[in-house]
Image: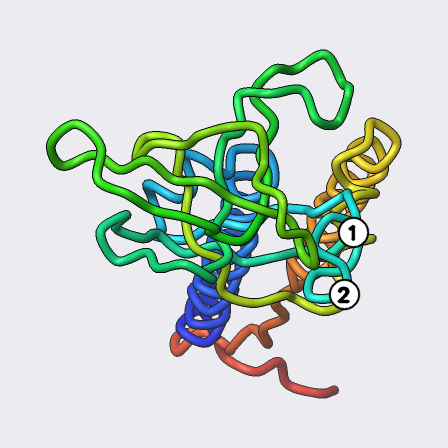
């Protein structure tokens, strides 16, 4: 009986370890790519961005969740779609280094191994006002992840963050309660055996 209970306990521990390990890994990945995309690019070799403007419609619709892969600027050609730091406040949010995704319009050598890169939006021949260099390039557009754009936009809001935190707390509480219910001690019953020296009572 003790051996069987011990085996069940180790199986339960292993299951819990796998569950929480996978949960922590998924949370780490989600937080890193959603809130720290630049660091995620260094860590994974790719990252994800939410496109909130219409400058690339219909190729990249508004609120699209795109995957951007690491790229060597030497490999870029005219017509590639790249994601980069624009050093401007296009979104009018008070930040002067908005991340933009546009087409490569021109690329020329600049000061040794560096490049001078001009970009443009979809369906527009006029070049953007900025000139990029290698250090401004984040990566090359790979593909769109369907549906997730609106979900990510929600999760990046304070309301969405609050909902996620509350749900995590509820999930942890439910798991702990479930484990507590499984760990209730089982009462062991045993039938006492008569002593070898004890003689049975004679009936009168």
54 is higher (above) or lower (below) than 77: above
**Which residue lies at the image location 48% right of the left edge and 54% below the top edge?**
68
Q: Quadrant of residue 127?
A: top right
Quickly name the residue at label 1: 63
Q: Quadrant of residue 61?
A: bottom right
Between disc 2 and disc 1, whose residue precedes? 2
Q: According to the image, what is the colour scheme of the structure? A: rainbow
Give 165 or 203, whichever is nearer the viewer: 165
Image side of residue 48 versus residue 167, left or right = left
Say which of marks 2 and 1 sits in front: 2
72 is higher (above) or lower (below) than 9: above
Image side of residue 146 versus residue 72, left or right = right
User: Furthest-top residue in view?
Assistant: 94
Quickly name the residue at label 2: 58
Dot 2: element: loop
Image side of residue 132 versus residue 153, left or right = left
User: What quarter of the picture does the C terminus occupy?
Assistant: bottom right
**Which residue lies at the image location 76% right of the left edge and 59% below the top edge?**
57
- In 3D space, how far apart are the residues under numbered discs 2 and 1 (Cα atoms)? 12 Å
Percent across and percent down for residue 111 are 16, 27
Percent across and percent down for residue 6 are 43, 66
User: Furthest-left residue in view?
Assistant: 112
**Which residue lies at the image location 66% right of the left edge and 63% below the top edge?**
187
Give 49 or 180, whichever is nearer the viewer: 49
Residue 51 appears anywhere in the view: yes
Percent across and percent down for residue 34 are 60, 41
User: Furthest-front residue in view?
Assistant: 126
């Amino acid at each position: 009986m003790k051996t069987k209970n011990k085996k069940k306990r180790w199986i339960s521990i292993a299951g819990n370890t796998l569950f929480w390990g996978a949960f922590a890994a998924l949370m780490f990945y989600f937080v890193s790519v959603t809130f720290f995309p630049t660091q995620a690019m260094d860590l994974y070799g790719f990252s994800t961005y939410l496109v909130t403007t219409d400058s690339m419609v219909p190729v990249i619709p508004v609120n699209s969740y795109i995957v951007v892969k690491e790229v060597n600027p030497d490999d870029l050609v005219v017509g590639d779609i790249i994601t980069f730091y624009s050093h401007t406040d296009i979104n009018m949010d008070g930040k002067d280094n908005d991340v933009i995704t546009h087409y490569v319009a021109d690329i020329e050598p600049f000061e040794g191994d560096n490049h001078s890169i001009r970009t443009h939006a979809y369906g527009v021949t006029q070049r953007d006002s900025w000139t990029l260099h290698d250090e401004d390039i984040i990566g090359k557009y790979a593909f769109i992840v369907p549906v997730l754009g609106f979900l990510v936009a929600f999760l990046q809001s304070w309301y969405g963050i609050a909902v996620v935190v509350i749900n995590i707390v509820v999930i942890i509480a439910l798991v702990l309660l479930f484990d507590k219910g499984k760990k209730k001690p089982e009462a062991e019953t045993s039938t006492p055996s008569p002593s070898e020296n004890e003689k049975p009572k004679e009936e009168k």
